[in-house]
Image (cartoon, grey):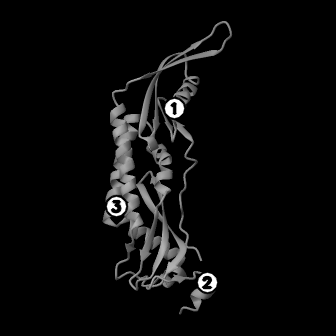
Amino acid sequence: MKLKIAVFLFASSQAFASNASTILCNGCSSTKMQDVAKEKARTLRFGMHNIGVLNINGADYNSYQANVSKDYNTGATLVQIQAQKSSSELQIESSAKELLGTIDELQKTLASKIYLPNDTPYKSVTTALSEPVPFSTYATYILRNTPTIQSKVTAMAATIETIAANAQVEASGIVLSINTQLSSGAITMIVFPDGSSLESSISFQNSLVDGIVINVTAGTMALDGEGKLISTSTTQLDNLY
């Protein structure tokens, strides 16, 4: 039996998201970043344009000046592009490194065991497995309100807003770009008062109202208080009562 809660997944990490001046290019090399800036320039009107390209996962921000003109002999659009130093470059890259560091700390916290309080209505993993929907909601609530996790999520959200403001991109686009880091290794064990436990995976959503929030999907690996594997099939669970 697999516990499920609504999980919000983001699009492929290689997707590009852009506004008028900055493009998010996740995992792109320096050469690819310049090529993407040139592609963007071809969509702009004739004249000079400043285009930023941000690779969050590499904590790399490049700024380019593009000169877009027309070849009056052929009618083709001509683009000349040159890298330039941006006053916000160091600040954006510093914030990106800070964001990646916070994600790493959050993953390490999530990799440790999450202990349910003694007054939890779910005293054992078998109870949780028999009530999948209520438990999934409850587990999400517990993780969202665990102080060590909550502080890191709050810090992460604040850094994302700083990057978004300095780079002139949507915060949701940054969350899209870091989805690989957020998803990778986000596995935890939820421990019940009787010592039994249930493996759970963590996903993240960028809410317009609440900012970055955590959602829990409890998996299929359950252990008893002695660390022995418990089958999560409905038939064998019924035999435990």
Circle 1: residue type: Met
Q: Is residue 117 left or right of residue 214?
A: left
Circle 2: residue type: Thr
Q: Quadrant of residue 143?
A: bottom left
On screen, 121 above or below 93?
below
Circle 3: residue type: Gln
Whole-percent x, y for residue 174 in the image: 46, 44
Q: Quadrant of residue 192?
A: bottom left
**Disc 1 versus disc 2: nearer the observer:** 1
Q: Is residue 73 left or right of residue 160?
A: right
Q: Classify 10 Å Cα crowding around label 1: few (below 14), some (14-19), many (20 and above).
A: many
Mark with earlier residue (2, 3): 3
Is 212 or 187 nearer to us in this picture?
187
- Name the residue beneath numbered marker 2: 234
Q: Is residue 197 left or right of residue 237?
A: left
- Residue at 42%, 84% in the rendered image: 123
Q: Classify 10 Å Cα crowding around label 3: few (below 14), some (14-19), many (20 and above).
A: some
Whole-percent x, y for residue 206 in the image: 46, 52
- Residue at 50%, 84% in the rendered image: 126
Mark with earlier residue (3, 1): 1
Real-space CA distance between mark 2 and mark 3, rounded to the nearest whole angstrom = 34 Å
Q: Are marks 2 and 3 in contact (CB under 8 Å)?
A: no
Whole-percent x, y for residue 8 in the image: 53, 57
Determine which of the numbered discs, if any, sits on residue 150 in the image: 3
- Work out which quarter of the rendered image holds the N terminus and state it: bottom right
Whole-percent x, y for residue 47 in the image: 51, 15
Q: Classify 10 Å Cα crowding around label 2: few (below 14), some (14-19), many (20 and above).
A: few
Determine which of the numbered discs, if any, sits on residue 33 in the image: 1
- Residue at 38%, 83% in the rendered image: 193
